[in-house]
Image: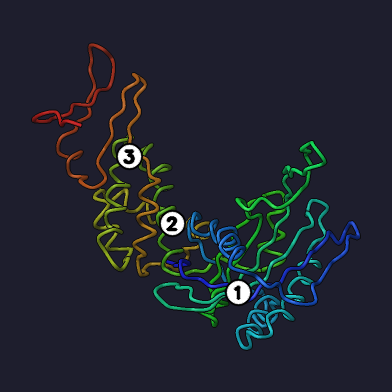
Amino acid sequence: MINLFNTQIESLSIHRVGNKSRAEAIFLSENTFNINDEITPLLKEYFFKPFREKEENYYQFAHDVDLDYNEMFNFANEIFANPSNVHEVSKKITKHLYEQSNHPHIKNGEVYVTYLTHLTIDNNPVDAIGIFKSELKSDFLQFEENNSNLEMVLQQGINLSKLDKGCIIFNYKKEEGYKILTVDSNRYDARYWLEHFLSVDSFQDENFMTKKYLKFVQDFAKDVVLPAEDKKEEVMFMNRSVNYFAKNDEFEEQNFINDVIDNPDLQAEFKNYKTDRAEKYSIEDVSSFPIANNAVSDVRKKIKNVINLDTNVQIKLDFINPESAEKFIEKGWDEEKQMYYYLVYFNKEQKQ
């Protein structure tokens, strides 16, 4: 979890980077930009809003050979070791970004490199480096008085409601490659920012593992439980799975299987399914890990707990009290109508 509420922008360097493949220029500012009380809140909202709204999926600097060969990792080390040198390092960062700007779809734009203080991540106060890029320009109107007339002047500028690209590098977990958050609003050049410029992999912490394993469980429910049983059992299986994660601090795979899957045949199917698909979910050698409660909450919100019937009827099951569906809903077959049915028991209808 991060907290950006009290974040201060200690320095701001602004440069411009063009598209190298089109022989566009790079412009490096000689000095830092002097921000004032008027522009600071606007910049903070522009820079940080996407990170407050976006789900927290963390990354870390990586390299196939050794982390020390990752240029951005070294630039971050240089800044954190001597924050007063951030402007000079910001020029190196912008040059590195320019070298990656070879695809014809990559747009030119302004690069903002900031040194940030008073952030909190995982309840730890830390400093951070913010790197942001604006690309898309918006039209806007200015009005000028010309004698007795008011005239319109069409201009272009940055829309402060939408950041195109950005990352926050937290001075935290350096040995793993720092903990990093990143956003990219423009998908026409997806590899350029994450892979070529930053060179990052997913940060495999408890948040990552919890989400990946629950995604694996969700696909198992769809691919195996639903065809073998029915929609109710698929929903109830996911219900039991999510509740296991919600009530435990540590995940133990065998305990999970025993707690969630009663059918021995289905237990064997679960293990086979994992063997076949573990690499896809990055859980090849995973049988235990700490559970991230916030990740469980995020996944629970996305899981559909509704049985949609072809008779335009919906049955919504309770994820908080799964035993209700097991006790009070029965599925059967009506020979006369040649149709399936659900029988629902209740004492009285609840008022809204």
**Badge 2 amino acid:** Lys
Residue on which the image places disc 1: 129
The numbered dot on residue 34 is: none
Q: Nearer the viewer, residue 290 or 178?
A: 178
Q: Nearer the viewer, residue 226 or 110?
A: 110
For the N terminus, which image quadrant?
bottom left
Residue on which the image places disc 2: 274
Alpha carbons under labels 2 and 1: distance apart: 39 Å
Of helix, strand and loop, which one carries label 1? strand
**Badge 3 amino acid:** Asn
In the image, what residue occupies the spot 35% across and 69% down?
A: 290
Which circle's residue, 2 or 1, is located before the other in the chain? 1
In the image, what residue occupies the spot 81% across and 56% down?
A: 103
Residue on which the image places disc 3: 305
**Above-or-below relation of 286 to 140:** below
In the image, what residue occupies the spot 26% across and 12% down?
A: 337
Q: Which of 64 and 26 is in front in this view?
A: 26
Can you tell which of label 3 and label 1 is closer to the viewer?
Answer: 1
- Name the side, left or right, on which 53 lies relative to 227: right
For the C terminus, which image quadrant?
top left
Residue 234: image location, x then y, percent: 33, 41
- Mark 1 and mark 2 in contact (Cβ < 8 Å)? no
Mark 1 Cα within 10 Å, few/some/many (few <14, many 20+)?
Answer: many
In this view, which residue lies farthest toward the front?
A: 148
Residue 296: image location, x then y, percent: 36, 57
Which circle's residue, 3 or 2, is located before the other in the chain? 2
**Above-or-below relation of 325 to 313:** below
